[in-house]
Image (cartoon, rainbow, N blue to C red):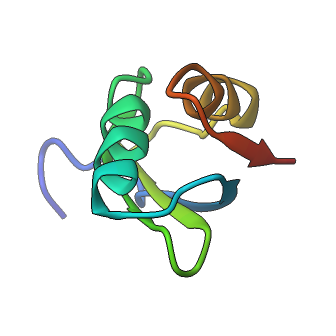
Amino acid sequence: MGLFNRGPEETVKLKVQGMSCGHCEMRVAGALKEVDGVKDASADHQAAQATVTMKAGKTADRAKLAAAVKAAGYEPEE
């Protein structure tokens, strides 16, 4: 147990429509990483999915994550 341990990290998967290549994956992941509390994000255009890891102790706000995907030009499925 470390001094800075604030609980487990939460991982969230989001369906994302409109990605067709690696560049699309980078845009979606980059947009998601800008959301407050996000530790890491990745996207897979073949699976039409993004995976977000929240910082320890932070809870995912699905509305903010969806808004980031939409702002990047893709369609989140809620």
Residue 44 percent location from the top left of the image? 44, 71
Q: Foreground: 58 or 50?
A: 50
Can you say whether 19 is above or below 31 in the image?
A: below
Residue at the far front in the pictured view: 20
Can you say whether 71 is above or below 15 in the image?
A: above
Q: Is residue 32 left or right of residue 77?
A: left
Q: Foreground: 40 or 54?
A: 40
User: Which quarter of the picture shows residue 48?
Assistant: bottom right
Residue visible at 72% across and 41% down in the picture: 75
| Quarter in which the N terminus is drawn | bottom left
Q: Is residue 39 left or right of residue 32?
A: left
Residue at the far right in the pictured view: 78
Residue 52 percent location from the top left of the image? 46, 54
Residue visible at 12% across and 45% down in the picture: 3
Q: Foreground: 4 or 51?
A: 51
Residue 41 seen from this side: no
Residue visible at 38% across and 64% down in the picture: 21
Residue 37 percent location from the top left of the image? 40, 29
User: Which quarter of the picture shows residue 64?
Assistant: top right
Q: Is residue 50 left or right of residue 64?
A: left
Can you say whether 74 is above or below 10 in the image?
A: above
Can you say whether 21 is above or below 72 in the image?
A: below
Residue 76 seen from this side: yes
Residue at the far bottom in the pictured view: 46
Residue visible at 72% across and 37% down in the picture: 62
Count of marks overlaid on the render: 0
